[in-house]
Amino acid sequence: MQHYYETRRLPNNPTATLAADISHHIEVRQYLGTALIVCDNPTAMLSATRKQWLKATRNLQRMRASTLNAEEILRLTHAIMHMQNMDFVMRTPADQPHANIYFLQPNTLSQIPLHCYTVYVTTPISKTTVESLIARLPAHSLTIDYTETNTISSVGLQPKINLERAILNEWRRLSAFLYDHDIDPNQLIVGNILQFTAMDDALDTLLNASDEFLERSARFQRILNFGQPFTLISSHQQKYFEAVTRLAHRVQALTPGDFNNYLDASFGDTGAELFFLRTTRSQLYGDIENAERCNHPL
């Protein structure tokens, strides 16, 4: 099983804090299973991170209040509700198995949360502890190292930038499929603005190839979510990802038998959510809990 690591340093900014950086990172990956923060003082870290989390939630509420776009309002409402229901705990997974974010000391890592795709290491831990921890994480999990030591990078993990390169490779394959169907992804976004006429034309075309498009889109969405937040992929490039993902949502909604929990489980954009896309054969490609059953290795 392949695992990845990311080394993070706090920005040279007087307002930057460890809790703020972790909160921002979790916000982007919040739909990707559970998260674990390894720290010396779980009480203080939980309090500081929750404060930043509430601040981020209020920012989304302000964004929702400032837009008249119904699609954006629905997306933001879904994100806000999800963030408001996230459970931050200092207990072990055995004591509280259904929480979302766990704050634990290094000596309490005998158990880790289920579906834990993100681990933040904020205090030095031994190589033995790191190896034991990584061995119990699911494939494609990400360990973020704030310690300024080389322990995390020395246990055979791949740098996260390799995952972002894999995303770009998968995007090239998906783009080639679109070009084969006379759809130019570059025409979907002009000057960072979504082109609705081009989107409508693409939708009409893709409805005739919905099964294959949804399968390819779900495979792309899966690796895309594992790789967030991005360092190699520009915000402009992400706009194209978002446009094609929205196309996949619309194709899914208009394909017979594919509307299952569409708005509840699938609505959003590539910067915020994990999508659950089904083909007309009803095979689930994007669900993380079933990802290992899918024959689509990264």
Image: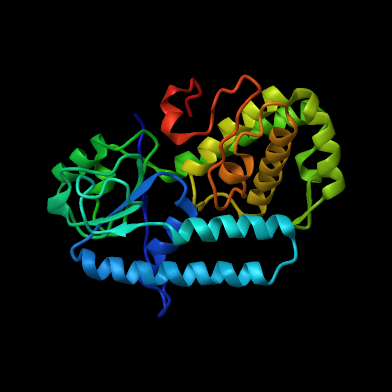
> For this view, does 39 lie left or right of residue 263?
left
Residue 248 image position (x, y, % from top left):
69, 37
Q: In the rendered image, which quarter is residue 63 located in?
A: bottom right
Q: Is residue 120 above or below residue 57?
A: above
Residue drawn at (66%, 30%) of the image: 258
Q: Is residue 192 above or below residue 168?
A: below
Nearer to the camera, 285 or 229: 285
Q: In the rendered image, which quarter is residue 65 located in?
A: bottom right
| Colour style of the rendered protein structure | rainbow
Q: Quadrant of the N terminus?
A: top left
Residue that sits furthest to the bottom in the current view: 14
Residue drawn at (83%, 49%) of the image: 196
Nearer to the camera, 202 or 97: 97
Residue 208 image position (x, y, % from top left):
80, 24
Nearer to the camera, 7 or 38: 38
> For this view, does 200 lie left or right of residue 233?
right
Residue 188 image position (x, y, % from top left):
79, 46
Residue drawn at (58%, 69%) of the image: 61
Q: Is residue 279 above or below residue 69?
A: above
Residue 165 image position (x, y, % from top left):
52, 39
**Residue 74 visible to an observer of this rendering:** yes
Nearer to the camera, 226 or 203: 203
> For this view, does 83 lie left or right of residue 146?
right
Q: In the rendered image, which quarter is residue 210 located in?
A: top right
**Residue 18 visible to an observer of this rendering:** no
Q: Total number of numbered labels?
A: 0
Residue drawn at (85%, 43%) of the image: 198
